């Protein structure tokens, strides 16, 4: 029997969603300050209005949804799923008011892309936007990488047993510390430390390659945010090609590769367990699949003879493939270059890298290395069972923070999520093909949206059909939250109509 | 009571596919539009005479134009990044090159342009680079197009021999939107009232 949600259920969902929206409003203070610093008065007013709307919405729900009840699992998942939609709707206000978007849907597309660290965008005339708006784009992706719920947990939600349930709903299930609030703070500690170090390195290189100290600083912070969160937004339309610097590319690559690692791994290394780096299943899986994707892409480009020498060939392939595999979406080539110069085989190599993605409980998207590792080990175990005597008991182990025995439940769960990802990619690709795009291109952009990567071969544009924009928004959302919250929200809606 | 609810459910189930079908049928097919679009009709010159070309042509037909002399005109954006005696500049030849969105131009898609490698001395002639506060200088360069530049790690660029300022840029005047500011202040006032109401609601709950 399906139980229809009661008023008390809506109250608890409303209360926590309200808190998260207040968090989004408070985040807008940063771009507001940047706008005021640069004397960009209209963007400053836009952010002030955005803050006001968030506060009114959040406080209104808090006033009318006061409750002492704690969250259940279904509440936590619904809050996670629904608050991302609400945060996208209100976060789009400054974007829409900037005048750089064709519709509110386009503005919401960019916000969802930012929160989910995807990096696809429909913003028009990026090279003339305000510094405040650029700060908002990058802050979104930085905050989204850690998780907007992690922010709310850190600053707005005091320790409740139910807090862990919203945290899990956002696609993270690692407890770095016994308490979920402490875990959220540990995630922020890691991210802020890297922010200082990474931005300083990019700032130094920026000044060395001819940027003024002031511009170099802002570009460094923004590019760091885009790298660390594996987001892929950049302050100029040329993306990372704008800098024409090997050093800049190397720092970006290091930051986005490190950023794509599991926060639990970071915490283990942080607390002295350095051997975890070489033992961890996700790291091993990442380097194997990265090598495979590199080989496929290299074969495609070598066949067409695109690059004249090995050095430039390796530089371009490594950056694009690692950016795709970590689901960052930074590029040092034009979008259409994938189609007109790289060709279908290299594009499939990049698509494979995007589809697999990086680590769980990180800022990255895709299937995740841990699932690829588990499925691969399970295949090996099956083969060993086949060739072993019937009486033999084949045991396979895997290591992620602790060593564990491979069991059917873990493999089943990993396979289920991978199947959902494949279905998501397929739906986007089929709709793209329906609208007349080439299959390889439709698949490329669909996988990019579903895996929260952000590379595009030209399908994503302000002129694309509205339905395809909606499909990509849903893909980004579903991919980032790893489906659980989506199903919980869907279940709640069904229960509203069919429950008793 | 159960019958009307069941009917409502059936109606909803019928309406949803119809709604999506109508959305799909009404939508244009941009993939076909792309296929039907006119291909760039400029051809590279067989001699060393440079040919005026757009960034779209250079990206779409990169191999054909590789190593050719080209003339490229657009708005200088971002900044000049001086590297020794040379400098990197970026020139956009998109729909915003004469007037950008901040000046009231209509929306016309993404930015597009080319990276230019030019003598630092020539780059210093540029007064304004396009950004939120400025419409950049319109610059015309003549140089060699590289689809995959050997000197610059495989980047697509133009090595410019000459640079000419076609139009000097200017500061963009932004008119402050006071109506929006008043609306923001009213909303903030409302938020203040709700903040007080929340405190009261919390106390009552306790």
Image (cartoon, coloured by chain):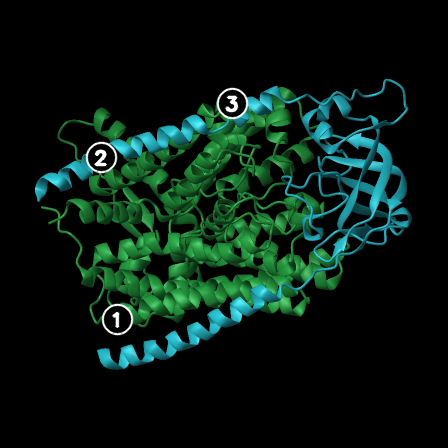
Chain colours: A green, B cyan
Badge 1 local density, few (<14 within 10 Å), some, or many (20+)? some
Number of labelled discs? 3
Q: CA distance from mark 3 to mark 1?
A: 52 Å
Find the distance from the CA under tag 3 to the CA under tag 2: 37 Å
Is residue B172 shown left or right of residue B14? right
The residue pinned by badge 3 equals A438
* Mark 1, secondary structure of its residue: loop
Task: Give the SS element for disc 2.
Answer: helix
Q: Residue at x 68, y 26 (%)?
A: B60
Identify the image quadrant of residue A310: top right
Task: State how far apart marks 1 and 2 are (Cα).
Answer: 36 Å
Q: Nearer the viewer, residue A300 or A447?
A: A447
- Percent of width and height locating residue B79: 77, 52
Marks 3 and 1: which is nearer the front? 1
Chain for numbered disc 2: B
Is the N terminus of chain B in the top left, top right, bottom left or bottom right quadrant?
top left
Residue closer to the observer: A243 or A33: A33
Q: State whether residue A201 appears in this view.
A: no
The answer to whether marks 3 and 2 mark residues whose Cβ atoms lie closer than 8 Å is no
Q: Position of residue B115 (x, y in %)?
A: 75, 40
On residue A66, the disc is: 1
Q: Which secondary structure, mark 3?
A: loop
Res. A148 image quadrant: bottom left
- Give the labeled residue for mark 2: B11
């Amino acid at each position: 029997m399906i139980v229809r949600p009661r008023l008390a259920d809506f109250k608890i969902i409303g209360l926590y969603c309200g808190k998260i929206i207040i968090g989004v409003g408070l985040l807008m203070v940063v771009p507001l300050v940047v706008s005021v610093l640069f004397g960009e008065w209209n963007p400053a007013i836009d952010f002030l209005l955005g803050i006001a709307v968030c506060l009114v919405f959040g406080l209104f729900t808090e006033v009318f949804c006061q409750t002492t009840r704690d969250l259940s699992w279904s509440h936590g998942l619904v809050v996670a799923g629904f608050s991302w939609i609400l945060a996208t709707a209100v976060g789009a206000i400054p974007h829409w008011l900037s005048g750089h978007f064709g519709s509110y849907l386009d503005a919401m597309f960019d916000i969802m892309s930012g929160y989910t660290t995807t990096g696809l965008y429909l913003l028009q005339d990026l090279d003339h936007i305000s510094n405040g708006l650029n700060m908002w784009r990058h802050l979104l992706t930085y905050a989204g990488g850690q998780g907007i719920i992690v922010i709310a947990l850190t600053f707005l939600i005091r320790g409740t047993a139910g807090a862990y349930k919203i945290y899990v709903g956002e696609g993270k299930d690692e407890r770095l510390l016994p308490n979920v609030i402490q875990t959220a703070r540990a995630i922020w500690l890691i991210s802020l430390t890297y922010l200082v170090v990474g931005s300083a390195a990019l700032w130094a290189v920026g000044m060395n390659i001819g940027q003024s100290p002031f511009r170099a600083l802002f570009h460094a912070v923004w590019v760091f945010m885009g790298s660390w969160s594996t987001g892929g937004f950049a302050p100029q339309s040329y993306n990372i090609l704008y800098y024409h610097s090997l050093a800049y590319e190397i720092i970006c690559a290091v930051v986005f590769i490190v950023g794509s690692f599991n926060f639990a791994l970071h915490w283990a290394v942080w607390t002295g367990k350095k051997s975890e780096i070489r033992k961890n299943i996700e790291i091993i899986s990442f380097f194997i699949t990265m090598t495979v994707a590199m080989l496929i892409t290299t074969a495609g480009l070598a066949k067409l003879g695109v690059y004249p020498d090995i050095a430039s060939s390796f530089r371009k392939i490594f950056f694009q493939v690692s950016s795709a595999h970590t689901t960052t979406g930074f590029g040092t080539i034009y979008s259409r270059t994938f189609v007109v110069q790289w060709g279908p085989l290299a594009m499939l190599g990049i698509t494979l890298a995007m589809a697999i993605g990086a680590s769980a409980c990180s800022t990255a998207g895709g299937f995740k290395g841990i699932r690829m590792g588990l499925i691969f080990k399970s295949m090996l175990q099956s083969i060993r069972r086949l060739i072993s005597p019937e009486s033999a008991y084949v045991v396979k182990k895997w290591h992620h923070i602790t060593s564990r025995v491979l069991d059917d439940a873990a493999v089943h769960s990993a396979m289920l999520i991978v199947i959902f990802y494949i279905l998501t990619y397929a739906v986007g690709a089929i709709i793209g093909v329906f609208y007349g795009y080439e299959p390889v291109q439709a698949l490329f952009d669909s996988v990019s949206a579903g895996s929260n990567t952000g590379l595009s071969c030209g399908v994503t544009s302000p002129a694309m059909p509205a339905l395809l924009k909606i499909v990509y928004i849903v893909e980004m959302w579903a991919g980032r939250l790893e489906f659980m919250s989506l199903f919980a929200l869907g279940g709640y809606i069904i229960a509203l109509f069919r429950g008793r | 009571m159960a019958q009307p609810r069941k009917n409502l459910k059936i109606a909803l189930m019928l309406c949803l596919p119809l709604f999506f079908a109508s959305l799909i049928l009404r939508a244009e097919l941009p993939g076909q539009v792309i296929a039907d679009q006119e291909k760039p009709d400029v051809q590279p010159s067989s001699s060393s005479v440079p040919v005026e070309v757009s960034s779209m042509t250079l990206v779409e037909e990169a191999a054909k134009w590789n190593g050719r002399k080209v003339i490229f005109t657009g708005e200088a954006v971002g900044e000049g990044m001086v590297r020794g005696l040379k400098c990197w500049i970026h020139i956009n030849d998109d729909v915003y090159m004469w007037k950008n969105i901040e000046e009231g131009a209509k929306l016309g898609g993404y930015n597009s342009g080319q990276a230019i490698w030019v003598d630092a001395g020539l780059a210093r002639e540029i007064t304004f680079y396009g950004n939120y506060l400025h419409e950049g200088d319109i610059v015309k360069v003549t140089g060699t197009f590289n689809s995959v530049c050997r000197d610059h790690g495989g980047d697509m660029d133009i090595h410019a021999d000459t640079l000419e300022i076609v139009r000097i840029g200017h500061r963009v005047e932004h008119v402050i939107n006071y109506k929006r500011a008043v609306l923001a202040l009213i909303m903030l006032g409302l938020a203040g009232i709700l903040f007080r109401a929340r405190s009261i609601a919390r106390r009552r709950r306790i």
